[in-house]
Amino acid sequence: LRMEQSDLVIGIAAIADFAAGDVFSDIVNMSQHNRCRFITHWGVGTTGVVKLTVQACDDVDASNTSAIPFYYRITLNATKPGAITLATAAAGVSNAAASAQIIEIEITAAQLLASGYKYVRLSVDETTDDPLLGGVLIERSEPRHADGLPAIATV
């Protein structure tokens, strides 16, 4: 089962204005996994816009960070997912101003290791201030060791 090969945690709890004031997801340790996926979702929010970027972090406090490139896919109104696209570190990805969206962001361990760091988080920059009722889930997958004991996800 896929559940046996991944762990899923809440990165930003779903609330009425999850991106208010520019926020960051919890930081996750990638030293024991090959992939990390941030699943940003919201139901209500017709004009709010966010810019999402992925930050490699040097430690659990994000004392130093570095934006890294990532892959993303957008699903609008629970329809067919869009194309998987590579985003540059600086450009990130922004949503269309509309309700009912999912933006999946995925990085590989190789993308993260190029930064020299082993921790990662999602940056949510509210570029158009209007509440989005949503949150962020974080899934780490492809464990490097098959001992059946997942490492603690968030730090």
Image (spheres, grey):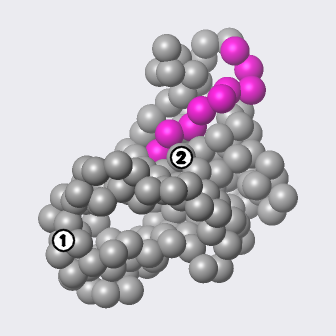
Q: Helix or strand or loop: what does disc 1 sit on?
A: loop
**Residue at horizontal 70 percent and vertical 66 percent from the top:** 68
**Residue nearer the viewer, 79 or 126:** 79
Residue type (three-letter) at the residue carrying disc 1: Gly
Residue type (three-letter) at the residue carrying disc 2: Arg
Question: Which stretch did the figure color magenta?
Answer: 138-146
Q: Is residue 132 above or below residue 120?
A: below
Image location (x, y in percent) of residue 21: 34, 81
Task: Compute the Cα span from label 1 to label 2.
Answer: 23 Å
**Residue nearer the viewer, 72 or 112:** 72
Residue 140: in magenta span: yes
Q: To which residue does mark 1 refer?
A: 45
**Residue nearer the viewer, 78 or 142:** 78
Image location (x, y in percent) of residue 2: 50, 21
Contact between marks 1 and 2 (CB within 8 A): the answer is no
**Residue at horizontal 67 percent and vertical 27 percent from the top:** 143
- Dot 2 alpha-carbon crowd within 10 angstroms: few under 14, some 14 to 19, many 20 or more: many
Q: To which residue does mark 2 refer?
A: 37
Q: Is residue 105 visible?
A: yes
**Residue at horizontal 74 percent and vertical 20 percent from the top:** 145
